[in-house]
Amino acid sequence: MKILNFGSLNCDNVYTVPHMVKAGETLSSASLEIFPGGKGLNQSIALARAGAQVCHAGLIGEDGRFLVKLAEENGVDCSLVELRPGRTGHAVIQVDPSGQNCILLYGGANQLVDEAYIRRALAGFGPGDLLLLQNEMNLPERMIDLAWEMGLTVALNPSPCSAALAKCDFRKVEWLILNELEGAALSGEPDVKKLPKAILQRFPHMKVVLTLGANGARYADSERQFFQPAFSVKAVDTTGAGDTFTGFFLAAVLEGKEVPEALLLASRAAALAVSRKGAASSIPARAEVDGGGGTRGYDAF
Ligand code: ADP
């Protein structure tokens, strides 16, 4: 069983500012730091660090070559990533002295997907393989339809939640991995305890994984329900918690692990990620998560 992650590749440009720039104002920033980003990239790196063989499909401009290099250094197969004219998707992030941020997104190459590219990316995959998607690229609905026609299993992390998801045929999505805000937006059910049921009423075939930040994660399908508490850690930076969770969870599922074991592994990995600064750089290696010879074993919890 192979996994194809069709996902965003982003440059996060972080500017340190005395205050958020106001309308009509020109403001100097004290520093600029450039970080690799994109939910797609983070999830591919999480899958690879968890030990899965992952192939990434996505689009970049010339300025995004460092993202591909980073993914490859982590063991992600990027042979399907293609170059497009123009800029890689990026974020302009202002961070003020209190640590608050405001974010301006530009989709760039992430928004240049066309049907021919989707078909090229899917060509090497077939029944039994898994397609993972987030919601930072255009045409997610075609990715889902074409993968379904070819017999792939579809896992969707509907993040960020936007109107584009309304076009997606959720009957073709087997694994739905989402946080409580996304769950509430998609289902209209604000009570997290009732949320998985509300989704399953509409889509009884689904396997729903609902993450609840420091409150853990819930799994539900039409027959079973599980709850996995979060590990208690000092949260330093929660960026990428969900991406780490998704990557480790699916890697465990691909290994044939049962859901409770996959939830446990994913929660351990995500707890380690939130205890460190950064997004992609905070994703732990499998050995650390298993507690077998990493720099930080499980005793830390
Ligand atoms: P997202 O990043 O998509 O919003 P969540 O915030 O729900 O996702 O976090 C995903 C998972 O990461 C949680 O289910 C939990 O296992 C872990 N996690 C998140 N925040 C914390 C925290 N403060 N302490 C420990 N684990 C956490």
Image: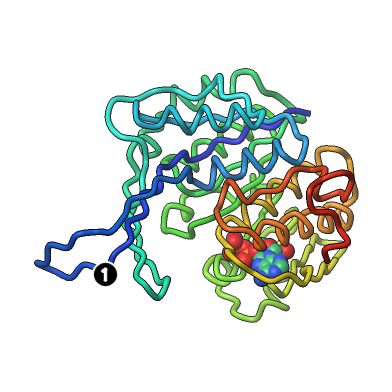
Q: Quadrant of ligand 1?
A: bottom right
The number of numbered badges drawn on the structure is 1
User: What residue is drawn where x is 44% and y is 40%?
Assistant: 139
Residue 12 lies, in percent from the top left, at 40, 48
Please, is residue 92 above or below residue 222 in the view? above
Residue 234 lies, in percent from the top left, at 69, 71
Asked whether, in this view, residue 155 is left or right of residue 95, the answer is right
Residue 65 lies, in percent from the top left, at 43, 27
Please, is residue 240 above or below residue 107 in the view? below
Q: Is residue 67 visible?
A: yes
Q: Secondary structure at mark 1?
A: loop
Color scheme of the displayed model: rainbow
In this view of the protein, which residue sits in the foreground, 124 or 265? 265
Quadrant, the C terminus? bottom right
Q: Looking at mark 1, is its residue's CB closer than 8 Å to ligand 1?
A: no
Tell me where residue 24 sits by quadrant.
bottom left
User: What residue is drawn where x is 56% and y is 19%?
Assistant: 79
In this view of the protein, which residue sits in the foreground, 288 or 131? 288
Asked whether, in this view, residue 90 is left or right of residue 130, the answer is left
Residue 247 lies, in percent from the top left, at 69, 46
Q: For mark 1, what is the residue? A: 20
Please, which residue is most extreme toward the left here?
A: 24
Asked whether, in this view, residue 24 is left or right of residue 57, the answer is left
Decide: few, some or many residues near mark 1? Use Cα within 10 Å; few <14, some 14-19, many ≥20: some
